[in-house]
Amino acid sequence: MNRLLILCTLWLALVSGVARAALPAAELEGLASDDFDARQAAVAGLVARGDEDARRVLQALSEDALMVAGKRLVILAKDGSASDAATGAPLRPAPANPEGVSLNNSLRQTVDGALAGFALLSPDPAARLQAARALQADMGDAAALLPLLDKALKQESDAAIRAVLVPLHAQASLHAEDPALRLQAVKDLSASASPAVKAMLLELLDKQGDTYNEPNEGVRAAAQSAVKAIDARLVWSDMAGRVFTGVSLGSILLLAALGLAITYGVMGVINMAHGELLMVGAYSAYAMQSLFRAQFPEYVDYYLFAAIPVAFGAAALVGMALERLVIRHLYGRPLETLLATWGLSLVLIQAARLLFGAQNVEVANPAWMSGGLQLAENLSLPWNRVMIIAFSGLVLLLVWLMMNKTRLGMFVRAVTQNRPMAGCVGVPTARIDTLAFGIGSGIAGLGGVALSQIANVGPDMGQGYIVDSFMVVVLGGVGQLAGAVWAALGLGVVSKFLEGWVGAVIAKILVLVFIIVFIQKRPQGLFALKGRFVDS
């Protein structure tokens, strides 16, 4: 029995020793060389093997655990134990004073990419998909990974993983020695819609002196066709991105202009302090964020739900106070009203500086508004802007219901269309003025909450939106919700397209010129008010 046990032990040791001799020492010699080209070749050889022994050595190399002891490469563990790099056999005692194998940035990037590539051979489909996406984000030395990608692609059966592996393999094949492989790689990449892929194909068409980076004329012709095909796809996604950005800008302008449309339509007041009501709403969001962080830190991601009513109430109270104390005494004197509200805007700005400081404050997006919806490689819709568009639509719906389905809305429309007649039939015009100004100011406060999620919050933030708000009101038609919607969204989208073509400054000038010409031809705006007083 003892003899049988001894024989079994010897046989297992022999089998283990054979298994551990999978890496010939000659293949690892380059890693111990002082020549980085030799190390690069050794790493490429390990990647080409694609087995567990190669992964073990590369992992040690990445963790700076691969050492040179005399003429032998050893792996030094964190606990001080050592093993032979070629066989994996433990070394007792551990070599004294081994020297580390250093890596430059390029070689380290190749090693890290190879280690990610080894996960492509994992039996777990989720791990393979994660590894493929990681390589998609950062390929490193693509040519060095070609053998590993070849092996992974041949044995991969999952359609979702193959959809990622095929372009990865094509990217790696762009630098293969065989022109046929490079040509096939270009054809595979021609179906892409990625700016990064386009940049790689353009590199093939670049010249170094009189020599192209890609020496084969057929591959260059295919690359030119592929670039044109990618450009055609990028145009559509780029246009979609500009439309989305323009709609999100238009949503902010709509929230800023809705309240102004109501107050300007009811009272004819040019309220130059309207931008500061946006600022009041934004600082209300900041105050609620600070309160939740201090008192309810576990619910800080929901501070916006508390900030919305607070911002509406705070801005409405400020607006009603302005109307009662100052604006009411200046009705019928537009120049004095303009100057007075401009002075009030300066007072509000200085008050914000005294309360919150002159510097901008941070209003962070909640976790559920972070990130975005990736529709294409160059088209991502940030969740904060998506939510702002949805929020603007909800506010617009509530304003429409108030204006068309409530007694207050009927009174507001009556005063807007014919103030003297509305007063004659018993409408309390003075009270309607105050309520309308409060509601319009509250809506501006809601716009400030939305603006706080995409812009800096500071005392001067409202100054940049007051002119745009008036442009929306004048272009859409005084007191017209439909006109405000079309004008805000139209100005937002047109501005973003013009900025992409001629720059932000020229775009602003062109928009102003267009509005001036339009108002000369149609002074009532897109949608004219209806009523006896207006028609006369």
Image: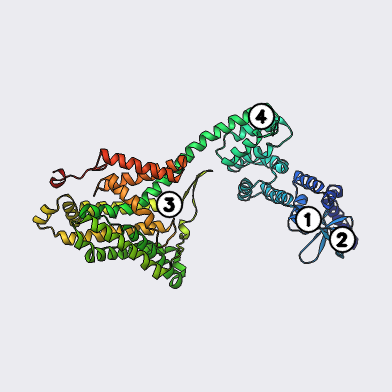
Query: What type is the residue that disc 2 sits on?
Result: Leu
Real-space Cα separation, disc 2 to disc 1, in angstroms: 45 Å
Real-space Cα separation, disc 4 to disc 3, in angstroms: 42 Å
Q: Earlier in the sequence, mark 3 or mark 2?
A: 2
Residue 138, position as x, y percentages in the image: 64, 48
Foreground residue among 431 and 17: 431
Real-space Cα separation, disc 3 to disc 2, in angstroms: 72 Å
Q: Which of marks 4 and 1 is nearer the N terminus?
A: 1
Real-space Cα separation, disc 4 to disc 1, in angstroms: 38 Å
Q: Earlier in the sequence, mark 4 or mark 3?
A: 4
Are the two marked residues, 1 and 3, in contact with CB atoms closer than 8 angstroms? no
Tell me the residue that label 1 is attached to.
Answer: 102
Q: Nearer the viewer, mark 3 or mark 2?
A: 3
Give SS at disc 4.
helix
Q: Earlier in the sequence, mark 1 or mark 3?
A: 1
Tell me the residue that label 4 is attached to.
Answer: 219
Q: Earlier in the sequence, mark 2 or mark 1?
A: 2
Q: Residue 5 carries which label?
A: 2
Residue 111, position as x, y percentages in the image: 72, 50
Which residue is the extreme one toward the bottom?
295
Residue 77 figure quarter? bottom right
Query: What type is the residue that disc 1 sits on?
Result: Ser
Tell me the residue that label 3 is attached to.
Answer: 385
Could one spot residue 255 in this view of the protein? no
